[in-house]
Amino acid sequence: MDNEAPDEADNALSALQRAEEITAALGQTTAGDHDALEALLPDLLGHEVKHYGMAFGKGLATGASDLVTLWQQLVGAFAAKPERARNPLVLRGYLRGASTRDPATTARLLDEAISDPLLGPSFPVLQTAVEIGERDAARLEAALQLSLARPGAYGYLAYGRVTDSIPSARLRRIVLAIASLPEGYEIASEILAARVFAAKSDGELIDDELVQCGQELLAIWSVAIKNHRLAYHLAEIVKACFAQPEAIPAFALVCRRLADELNGYPTYISDYPELLTQLFRTHPTVALDEFFGGPAINNRLLTRWRSSHHVRENPLDAVQTEIHITWAQANPSARFPILASVITPFIDHDDGTDPTWTPAALELLCLAPDRVTVLTRLLSPLVPTSWSVSLADILVRRRALLHPFLTDADPAVADWARQRDDELEQQIQQNRMRERWANEGFE
C-alpha cells in the first residue's frame, strides 16, 4: 500500500505529459491546415481553452510556416474576443514554441507587446513564456512604468520558478514596483516568497538584495490587508529575510504595527496564524517585547489571543519555555500574569483521557511571584465557549487540572483551588440536569 501513492503520482504525471504531447502535436498539425485553424481561432483565445492552451500554442509555433504571420492571426483573434473573455495562454504557448525556433523574432514580438494597447494588459503573462534574462527583466520594468498590465497578470511570476534567472537587484525593483500597484501587494509577496523558497530548497543563501527586498516589502505592508494566503507568504519572507541580528529593528517594527492592529477592531489573531508563529519563532524575545511588553498592553489583546486558541494553534507555542520564563523574570509582577493569559495552558486529548498542563504553564506556576493570579489566568478557559459533546463530561475531565493544587503547600493557592473545584462541581451538576432534560425532550 505504501508504494502505491508514488506510483499513482508518477502515472498521473505521465498521463499529463502524454496529454500535453498530443495537444502540441494537434497544434502543430493545425498550423498547416488553414481551414481548421480558421474554424478554431474564435475559441483558441477565450476561456474555453484551459489546461492545454500552452501546449496547443507551442505546437502552433512548431508547425508555423511563418512565425510572424501566424502570430498576427492569433493576435487578431485575441482582439476579436470581448476584453473579459480573452485568455492569453495560447499566445504564451506560441511564444514559448517560437523561442526555440527563432529567439530573435520572439524577443522582437515581446518588445512590441509591452506598449501594445491590446497585448500590454497581458504582457507579464506573455513574458513568462521564455526564460527571463536581463533584457526580459528590463521589459517587465518597462511594463510597470507604462502601467498597461493588470496587476493580476504579474502573478505568473510566482510560478514555475520563472524568476530564478532574474538578477536579485532587478527582481527587488520589480517586486517593490508591483507591491505599489492597486491590489499588487499580495502578488508581490507571493513572487518574493516563491523566490526565497526556491533558493532555500536548493540550499542557497538568500543574498542581501533579496533580504533587503523582504524587509522593505514588510515595511510597506498595510496590516489591514489580510488573508491566510498572504499570511503564509509573509511568514516565508520573515523566515528568509529577518533572521539576521541586524534585521531586528525592522523586525520589531513589523511586530509593533501588527500588535497595534490586533489591539483594534476588526483584526484577529486567526487572520495571521502562520505569520505570527514565524515572528515568535524568528526573534521570540523581541516579539514578546513588542506584543506584550509595552505600556499599551490591554485586556482586549489578551482576550483575543486566548479566544483564538480553539480555532488555530497558538503562535506562542513556537517559543521555548526557557525563553518565556527569562522574559517574564525581567518584570515578574506584570509579565507572569500576561504570559498566563496568552500561552496554551493545557492540552485536551482526543482519546478521552484527562487534559494535561503544558510545560510552560507548569513552569509559570512554579516560579510566579503571585501564583493565585497566574493560576486564575491559566484556567480562565477552563469552561469552553463552544462544544460538540457533553459539556458536563468536558468539565469533569478538565476538573482534574485542579487536583494537584487542592492540597498545595501555599494556603492561598489551595483555598483558591478548592473554591474553584466547588464551583465546577455545581456547574457539572447543573449541566447534567440540562442535558438530561434535553434528552428527555427528544424521547
Image (cartoon, grey):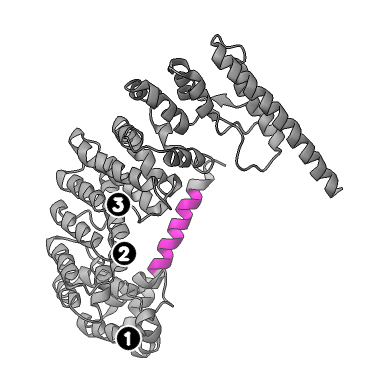
The disc, 3 or 2, on the residue closer to the chain's N-terminal end is 2
Asked whether the beta carbons under mark 3 and mark 2 sit within 8 Å of each other, the answer is no
> Magenta stretch: residue 14 in it?
yes
Residue kind at label 3, given as amino acid type? Ala
Query: Looking at the image, is mark 2 or mark 1 nearer the viewer?
Result: 2
Percent position (x, y) of residue 237?
28, 46
- Tell me: residue 218, above or below residue 127: above
Q: Is residue 107 above or below residue 347?
A: below
Amino acid at dot 1: Ala
Q: Main secondary structure of the magenta part?
A: helix
Q: Is residue 325 visible?
A: no
**Mark 2 residue crowding within 10 angstroms, few (<14) / some (14–19) / many (20+):** some
Magenta stretch: includes residue 5: no
Camera-side residue: 138 or 341? 341
Distance of label 2 from label 1 (alpha carbons) = 29 Å
- Residue at (25% x, 78% y) in the render: 119
* Residue that label 1 marks: 77
Q: Mark 1 or mark 2, which is nearer the start of the sequence?
A: 1
The residue sitting at the right extreme is 443
Residue beneath disc 2: 183
**Badge nearest the viewer, 3 or 1:** 3
Q: Position of residue 290 (x, y in %)?
A: 31, 36
Q: Where residue 96 appears, x then y in whole percent?
A: 26, 69
**Mark 2, secondary structure of its residue:** loop
| SS under mark 1 | helix
Q: Which residue is mark 3?
A: 194
Q: Quadrant of residue 115?
A: bottom left
Q: Crowding near pointer 3: few (<14 within 10 Å), some, many (20+)?
A: many
* Figure quadrant of residue 180: bottom left
User: Disc 3 versus disc 2: distance between alpha carbons?
Assistant: 18 Å
